[in-house]
Image (cartoon, rainbow, N blue to C red):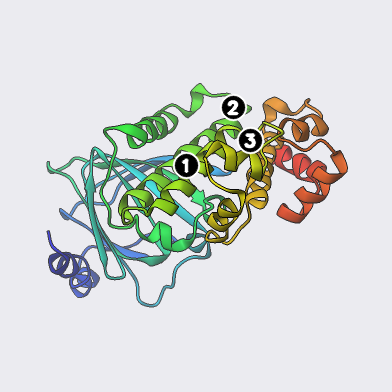
Amino acid sequence: MNEVDLRHNLIAPQAEAIAGGRHEIGDTGFAGDDDHGLALASYERETQFGPLRVAMRSFQPLRLWRASENPAMPEDRETYQLLVPLAGTLNALWDDRQATSGVGSLVVHDMSRLVACEFRTRDLGTDFRTALVTVPRSLLPLPGGHIDRMLGNRIAACEGVGALLAGFVTNLARTPDAYRPSDGPRLGMVLLDLISALVARTVDDSCKVPTHREALTLRIKAFIQQHLREPDLTPRALAVEHNISTSYLHRLFQDQDTTVSGYVRAERLHRARRDLADPALRDVPIHSIAAKWGFSQAAEFSRAFRNAFGFPPREFRREALRT
């Protein structure tokens, strides 16, 4: 189905649907009609895993479009969705971009930009089924333009990170009762890491072939990620490791609008923040977590953490473990 067909099938039928089997879909701002003239029936089960919500949804074939009088909901502007279709196909239209996905693929979904959507199944009377994750945008440390590149892309769920993520999401959605409440935050962090890895990989694959400077910068960043705990992760040590001068190393990171030391510090702070939010580490002293990630002075760590995240580490940990 090409873009013209999708626009015709999803947007043009509005007048017909108003006269026939049109439904107002809760408080979503969308209207719709069921594809086969059947009564709309749905199943939904949603579970919180830390800051992420994982759900299993099932409903009959359906067309949806955004009602012109209803803008995007506030939550839609603050979250992304990742869908793992389990039965049926999904045709979606965001502004001027289209995607068709089904079993064996993943869909990154921006509800605030969605114009229309169609859910189909092969056999009459069967349901479209999907597992999905709702992710706060603030937790994906990528510019919005990077996420935009994923809209409309067919992301394979049969190999690599895509397969690992699809299986993980599906298991969480199907068997949420198999996990204890204390497992939730940690599983949520694992899930967020997998989503971040998928986004980074998909964005990298969709970009042009990197230059030598860009490829070298990526290798250095990967090396930093693998050695964050080492105390001598200095610009000089990194330059020696990669057979370049320290001044050239600094120029590489200037291209990234940061400094070598600033990048290392930011990554260490993010790892420390993740540990502070982990219920399994609630009894580990804050200064031990700081030291683990290269901060030997507690006062220095507290100051850097507050500057980066707006809260002192003790207050952040208390609130994270409470929620």
Q: CA distance from mark 3 to mark 1?
A: 14 Å
For marks 2 and 1 on the same chain, the one whose residue lies earlier in the sequence: 2
Q: Return the residue at label 3.
A: 228
Place of residue 84 in the rendered image (x, y in percent of width and height, measured from the top left): 33, 41
Which residue is rendered at x = 24% and y = 41% of the image?
127
Q: Secondary structure at mark 1?
A: helix
Residue 54 or residue 287, whichever sits in front:
287
Mark carried by residue 183: 2
Q: Is residue 196 left or right of residue 305?
A: left
Camera-nearest label, 2 or 1: 1
Q: Secondary structure at mark 2?
A: helix
Quadrant in which the N terminus is drawn = bottom left
Q: Secondary structure at mark 3?
A: loop
Which residue is rendered at x = 75% and y = 40% of the image?
317
Pointers 3 and 2 in contact (CB under 8 A)? no
Which residue is rendered at x = 57% and y = 60% of the image?
254
Camera-nearest label, 3 or 1: 1
> Which picture quadrant has residue 34?
bottom left
Which residue is rendered at x = 73% and y = 36% of the image?
294
Quadrant in which the C terminus is drawn = top right
Q: Which amino acid lies under the numbered mark 3 shown in the image of this protein?
A: Leu
Above or below: residue 308 compared with residue 112? above
Q: Return the residue at label 1.
A: 219
Place of residue 178 in the rendered image (x, y in percent of width and height, measured from the top left): 49, 22
